[in-house]
Amino acid sequence: MQRWYGKLLGFIAGWLLLRHPAGGVIGAIIGHAFDAGWLAPRRYKDHQVFGLGPEATREEIDQAYRKLISQYHPDRVAGAAPELRAQAEARAAELNAAYDRLRRGRDGRKTRR
């Protein structure tokens, strides 16, 4: 379910602050940016790559990473069409980058595997 309350609160706040209907529109646009997650910190976006929330545990992140990387690993689609290989390589690179950022943030430093 998509969030909607940021748009409503932004509309009301913009209207009240600027005392003009255009302020309501500006506030609704800012509220939409919050609802859509455009202004969310990167660490929350890294969790979304794995389909997890920001409260996910270390074990849940590791399990989701292993499941998804085994599905999108480029060696697994070596005999597929070039477009599918390119998509799998892009998704695997995205998974690896998000996992590395989460591990670095979790451990406080870059870790070796």
Image (cartoon, rainbow, N blue to C red):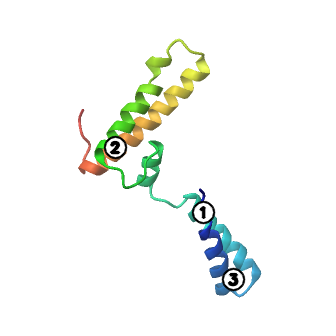
Q: Residue at x 46, y 26 (%)?
A: 71
- Looking at this view, name the residue that lies furthest to the right: 21
In the image, 19: left or right of 103? right
Residue 80: x and y in percent read: 56, 15
Instruction: In the rendered structure, find residue 33 and report the number of the disc placed on it.
Output: 1
Residue type beneath disc 1: Ala
Can you say whether 19 is above or below 87 in the image?
Answer: below
Question: Could you tell me which quadrant the N terminus lies in?
Answer: bottom right
Q: Label 2's element? A: helix
Q: How many marks?
A: 3
Instruction: In the rendered structure, find residue 15 and report the number of the disc placed on it.
Output: 3
Camera-near label (3 vs 2) is 2
The first of marks 1 and 2 along the sequence is 1
- Nearest to the observer: residue 18 or residue 58: 58
Question: Could you tell me which quadrant the C terminus lies in?
Answer: top left
The first of marks 3 and 2 along the sequence is 3
Residue type beneath disc 2: Glu
Q: Label 3's element? A: helix
Q: Residue at x 53, y 11 (%)?
A: 79
- Nearest to the observer: residue 101 or residue 6: 6
Residue contact between numbered discs 1 and 2, judged by CB atoms under 8 Å = no
Circle 3 Cα neighbour tier, 10 Å, few/some/many (<14 / 14–19 / ≥20) = some
